[in-house]
Image (cartoon, helix red, strand yellow):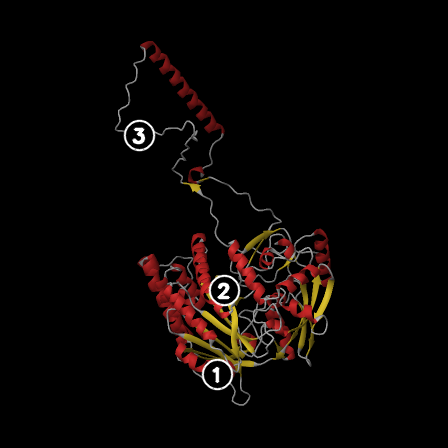
Amino acid sequence: MYRAHNLKRSLQNRHHRSIPPHSTPTTIPPQNPLNPTVLRHPFSTTPNPPLPSPASSNSSSELLKYLGYTALLAASAAATYYSFPYPENAKHKKAHLFRYAPPPDDLQTVSNWSGTHEVQTRVFLQPESLEELEKIVRDANERRQKIRPVGSGLSPNGIGLTRAGMVNLALLDKVLEVDKERRTVRVQAGVRVQQLVDGIKEYGLTLQNFASIREQQVGGIVQVGAHGTGARLPPIDEQVISMKLVTPAKGIIEVSKEKNPELFYLARVGLGGLGVVAEVTLQCVERQELVEHTFISNMKEIKRNHKKFLSENKHVKYLYIPGTDAVVVVRCNPVSKWKGPPKFKPKYTNDEAIQHMRDLYQESLKKYRGEATAKMPDEDEPNVNELSFTELRDKLLALDPLNTDHVKKVNQAEAEFWRRSEGYRVGWSDEILGFDCGGQQWVSETCFPAGTLAKPSMKDLEFIERLVELIEKESIPAPAPIEQRWTACSKSPMSPASSLAEDDIFSWVGIIMYLPTMDARQRKEITEEFFHYRHLTQEQLWDQYSAYEHWAKIEVPKDKEELAALQSRLKKRFPVEAYNKARKELDPNRILSNNMLEKLFPSADTI
C-alpha cells in the first residue's frame, strides 16, 4: 500500500483583501480611448452655462414620472428585504472582493523546515518495503511520472522538492544489521540519524561525526554531502562503504569500493539523481564520551593558536559575532581515561547567563511597543523567563530585523551570553556535537580549501576577516553567528570537499538571516536583504577563495546570465559530464530529477 504524507507548514498567513464595512466601492466606467469620459470636479471656478427654462406643462409630467420610478424602487427593495432577510450578524461581516476555493483533498503541501520552499503535489509516496519501492520506481518510469526522492525536508534550499511528485522513505527506517567486529551497520535509508545512533549504542558503536541536528534521514544526509566539524574527520559521505540504489533503468543495484567503484564514489553524493538510495552500510566508531570546552576569544588570539586548535582537537568550530570582537571557540575531545572529566564549577547559572538577553528584550519592548506592552504583555505572549536563548534571540530580532543598530545590540547581548556560558560539559558524542541552529532562517554555507593539517594556509581566517569588513562597510544587519567549521577531504567527486590529496583540509563558513516572524511582508524584506548579503559575499569572496556552496544550501538564480555563470562555475569544480552521463544511463526519463537539478546540471540535449 502507498501512503500519502500530508506535511503542512504555513510559510505565511494568507489574508483576503476586504472592503471596510462602512465604505462602498466606487466604479468608474471604462474610458473609450477615442471618446474619453470627462470626470468633472465637484467644485469648479468655471461657471456652467445657463440651462434653458422648461415649459410648465412638461414640468409636472416629468415630476410624476420620477415619483413613480421612486415608488417602484422602494416597493422592490421592501419585497426583496422581507423575502430574503439578512442574518442577525450580517452587519458585522466584511465584504470580500475574492473568495478562494479550498484546495482539493488529495493535494499535499510539503515544505522545508524553514518555510522558505514549499510545493503542493498530488503524488507523495511512502513505500513500506524494498519491493514496493522497486515497483513504484519501475511504474513511474514507465509512465514518466516524477518521483523525486525527498528526506526529512531539512535542507534549507528544498533540494528534494517538486510539485510533479515525490517519494519519501520515512517508513523504511530499520537498522538491518550490525557487525560489532567490523564496526559497521547496514540501515534502510529512511532511518533518522538519532534513531540509528540509538539503535547501535547497545553495541558500543556510534557514527564518526554528526551535523548540527539529528532529524535527517540517512539517505538524505549522505546524498547532499553533509558534514560535521574536525580537521581530521571527513564529511559524512566518507563513512559510506556500500549502498543499494533503486534505479529507473536498471532496477536495484549495489555499489561499493569493490563493486562498481566509479559509480559508487559518484553516487555517494548523488543528490538523489542517480537512484533512490534504499540501503546504506556505514563505517562506525567506538562509542565515546566527549568533553566540550566553550570559551570566548578574539581574532588576534585565534590567529596565534589556529594551527594548534586544528591539530590538537578532534572537533573544533568558531562562532563569530558580527559587530563585536568576540569569537566563540567550541572544541570537543574524548574524555581522558586517566584524568577523567575536568572538574569545573561554572561562574554563572543558566539563568544568569541568559539574563542579559531578557533585559534587552524588555528594554526593546518599551522602545518598539510602548511602556504598557512591556509591563502587561499579551496573553498569547510566552513568559520571557521560560524562553531559551535562541527563542529570545528570535523574539528580539523580530522587533526590527533589518535595523543594523538593533541587530548589533542583539549580537552584543549574544556575545555576553556566551561569555557567561564559558566552561565544560561532558556527554556522549551524539549529545555533545549537536547545535541549536535557532528558528526558521535563510542560510548560505560555502566550502573552500584551507591548506593541510600540517600546514594550514590561513586562508580560512583571511576569508572571515574580509567577510567581517564587508558586513561593516555595507552596514549589513548580519545576525550571529557566522559559523566556521573544518573537515578533512572526501573522495566523492561531487562533494564540495573532494580532493585526491589525502592531507587536504577544507573550511566551511555559514552566513545566516533568521525569519523570526510569519508576517509575509517582513519575511519578504528579510529574504531580499539576505540575498543581497549573499550576493556580496559571492561577488567579493567566492572566486578568490575557490568557495562552493553546500548542495543543501545552494540557490538557483532567476537571472539567466547568473544561472549560466553558475553552471560554468560548477563545471570547473565538479565532474558534471560524468554525473549527467550516469543520470542518462540510470534515469533516462529524469523521473528522479526536479527543476533545481535540471537548472544546475543541464544535459547537452536540453541546452
Q: Is residue 473 visible?
A: yes
> Going from the N terminus, do you reach mark 2 or mark 1 first?
1
Q: Distance between the residues labelled 2 and 1?
A: 28 Å
Figure quadrant of residue 234: bottom right
Question: Which residue is at the front of the view, 279 or 462?
Answer: 462
Q: Which residue is drawn at 34% across and 58% down?
A: 368
Q: Position of residue 82 (x, y in %)?
A: 47, 28
Q: Distance between the residues labelled 1 and 3?
A: 82 Å
> Going from the N terminus, do you reach mark 1 or mark 3 first?
3
Q: Where is residue 185 in the image (x, y as percent from the top left)?
A: 67, 74
Disc on res. 58 = none
Q: Within 10 Å of the Cα at label 3, are there few (<14), some (14-19), or many (20+) other Cα atoms?
A: few
Question: Which residue is at the front of the view, 375 or 594?
Answer: 594
Quarter the C terminus occupies: bottom right
Identify residue type, mark 2.
Ser
Mark 2: which secondary structure? strand
Mark 1: which secondary structure? helix
Disc on res. 42 = 3
Q: Mark 2 highlights which residue?
A: 444
Q: Position of residue 416 (x, y in %)?
A: 38, 73
Q: Where is residue 173 in the image (x, y as percent from the top left)?
A: 66, 66
Q: Which residue is drawn at 70% across and 54% down?
A: 140
- Answer whether labels 2 and 1 touch (C-beta < 8 Å): no
| Vertical placement of residue 579 versus 100, above or below | below
Q: How far apart are marks 2 and 3 (CA)?
A: 58 Å
Identify residue type, mark 1.
Lys
Figure quadrant of residue 320: bottom left
> Going from the N terminus, do you reach mark 2 or mark 3 first?
3
Disc on res. 308 = 1
Q: Residue at x 40, y 39 (%)?
A: 21
| Vertical placement of residue 43 versus 183, above or below | above
